[in-house]
Amino acid sequence: MIAPASPKPSLRQHNNRMPLSLQIASLLRHRLQQGEWRVGDRMPTLDAFMVEYEVSRITMRMAMAELEQEGLIERARGRGTIVIADVTQERWLMLPNQWPALVAHIEHLHARVVELESGSRQPSLDPNEGGTAARYWWARRINWTRRAPYSLLTLYLERETYDRHRAIYQRTAILPTLAQYESKQIASAHQVLTIASATVEVAQHLQLKVGDPTAEVRRIVRNHHGEVIYLADVIYPAKHLRQETQLLPVAGGA
């Protein structure tokens, strides 16, 4: 039995303000991430893509130029379009949904912290998010790995907690230190993820294009009195992000 053809991606949607060439570039980038073409492979011709996506030659050229500018492909007369970068492993940034795994992943990233500004400031909390402590240390920073900047965040840390290990908090990612030294006062932690788009400022800091997809995470840690000891609003590039969730326990597990 012949499997039904995959539905053609919908372009030119009325509520999609992204230029058509960028929509196509995004679709092709996704196909590269899925391994449809590997490094050294020759991609289909411009004419073939024009038929597939039902677009003009100029639109298709602009889409391919976008991928070439990103260093994913190389176009040469007589050779066609060749894939020159492996993006199948691009999603290296995990977003675990359990505290130990989240802390371990952040430790594994070995972040290099670039602080944009800091000082004393009170967070704005919804009533269901917990109570506020008397004082907080506040900072805006970018976390880097050797690969790229991977998060832009605004964070608040209860002041006495910060003062106990301020030298460490100032130069490293917060959660591993918090988990190591303050485990007895941590009663609960949760995070909420929202999909958004990169603003001009976010694009500049995270080496994205304006409008690129991002994941915005609000992460809150509370003590046994219900006070928020740590709050962070974190923005991640969605192109690097991967999340796995065990929906059912593994058969035969404990």
Image (tube, grey):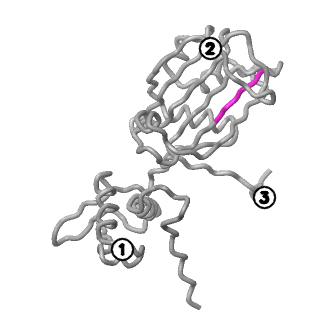
Q: Which residue is mark 3?
A: 252
* The one of 28 and 252 positioned closer to us in this rendering: 28
> Residue 173: where, in percent of width, then height?
54, 25
Q: Position of residue 108 (x, y in %)?
A: 52, 35
Q: Residue furthest right?
A: 225
Q: Nearer the viewer, residue 101 or 121?
A: 121
Secondary element type, mark 2? loop
Residue on which the image places disc 1 = 49
First in sequence, mark 2 or 3: give its number.
2
Residue 49 in the image, given as x and y percentages of width and height: 36, 74
Alpha carbon separation for disc pair 2 and 3: 50 Å
- Determine the CA span between mark 1 and mark 2: 53 Å
Up/down of 16 relative to 106, above or below: below
Q: Residue at x 71, y 19 (%)?
A: 229
Q: 10 Å neighbourhood of mark 2: few (<14), some, or many (≥20)? A: some
Q: Residue furthest left?
A: 78
Q: Is residue 113 above or below residue 31?
A: above
Q: Residue at x 57, y 85 (%)?
A: 3
x%, y% of residue 4? 57, 84
Q: Does the magenta portion include 229?
A: no
CB atoms of marks 2 and 3 within 8 Å: no
User: Would residue 15 appear left or right of 132 to someone viewing this image?
Assistant: left
Tell me how far mark 3 sits from mark 1, CA to CA.
48 Å
